[in-house]
Image (cartoon, rainbow, N blue to C red):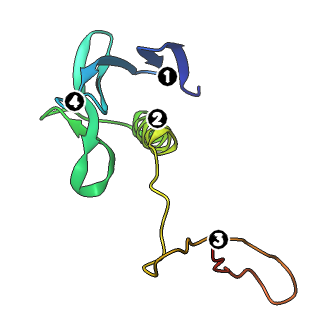
């Protein structure tokens, strides 16, 4: 069974559920509780040093391959969602009066980037 989003605050897996329990202190990232029929197994939250969501298991919990796969899928989905929603700064050229524009061209010579003055 794949992960099924029941609502904005709950996702269901085969044997486990993910429930949003709030946000980080900064309010920028979500915190999720992972449970199995009411028993808390661990938490999913943003881990800044790795710049991604991660899973923190409750001590003494054991997992089989379906649960591990679904936890990994959920963590990857949340990381992807966060990265897509985050605003990205526009790179600028260190030279005054120019900006960097990246254009990908695919031909017999492969992709390359060009710099365009503005």
- Do the residues bearing badges 2 and 4 touch, measured as CB atoms within 8 Å? no
Q: CA distance from mark 3 to mark 4?
A: 34 Å
* Residue 18 x, y percent position in the rendering: 38, 21
Classed neighbour count for the residue bearing mark 2: other residues with Cα under 10 Å, few (<14), some (14–19), many (≥20)? many
**CB contact under 8 Å: marks 3 and 4:** no
N-terminal of the two: label 4 or label 1?
A: 1
Question: Upstream in the sequence, badge 2 or badge 1?
Answer: 1
> SS for tag 3?
loop
Q: Which residue is mark 1?
A: 14
Q: Quadrant of residue 101?
A: bottom right
Residue 102: x %, y % from top left: 64, 71
The residue labelled by disc 2 is 70
First reached walking from the N terminus: tag 3 or tag 1: 1
- The residue that disc 3 covers is 102
Residue 15 coordinates in the image, percent (x, y)? 43, 21
In the rendered image, the residue lying farthest to the front is 97
Q: Earlier in the sequence, mark 3 or mark 2?
A: 2
Q: Residue at x 67, y 79 (%)?
A: 113
Other-residue count near label 1 (Cα within 10 Å), few / some / many at <14 / 14–19 / ≥20: few
> How many circles with numbers are drawn on the protein?
4
**CA distance for labels 2 and 4:** 23 Å
> Could you tell me if the residues under marks 2 and 1 are in contact, i.e. CB atoms within 8 Å?
yes
Which residue lies at the image location 73% right of the left edge and 72% below the top edge? 104
Real-space Cα separation, disc 3 to disc 1, in angstroms: 43 Å
Label 4: which secondary element:
loop
Residue indicated by mark 4:
24
Query: Which callout, 3 or 2, points to the residue nearer the camera?
Result: 3
Query: In which quarter of the view is residue 75 placed?
Result: top left
Q: Nearer the viewer, mark 3 or mark 1?
A: 3
What is the spatial separation of the Cα atoms under label 3 and label 2, in whole angstroms? 36 Å
Q: Which residue is depicted at the point 46% across and 78% down?
A: 96
């Amino acid at each position: 069974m794949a992960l099924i989003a029941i609502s904005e605050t709950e996702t269901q897996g085969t044997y486990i559920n993910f429930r949003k329990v709030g946000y980080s202190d900064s309010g920028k990232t979500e915190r999720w509780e992972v449970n199995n029929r009411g028993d808390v197994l661990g938490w999913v939250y943003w881990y800044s040093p790795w710049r991604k969501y991660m899973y923190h298991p409750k001590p003494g919990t054991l997992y089989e391959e379906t649960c591990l796969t679904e936890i990994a899928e959920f963590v990857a989905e949340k990381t992807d969602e966060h990265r897509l929603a985050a605003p990205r700064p526009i790179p600028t050229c260190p030279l005054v009066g120019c900006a960097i524009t990246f254009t990908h061209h695919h031909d017999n010579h492969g992709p390359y980037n060009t710099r365009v003055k503005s």
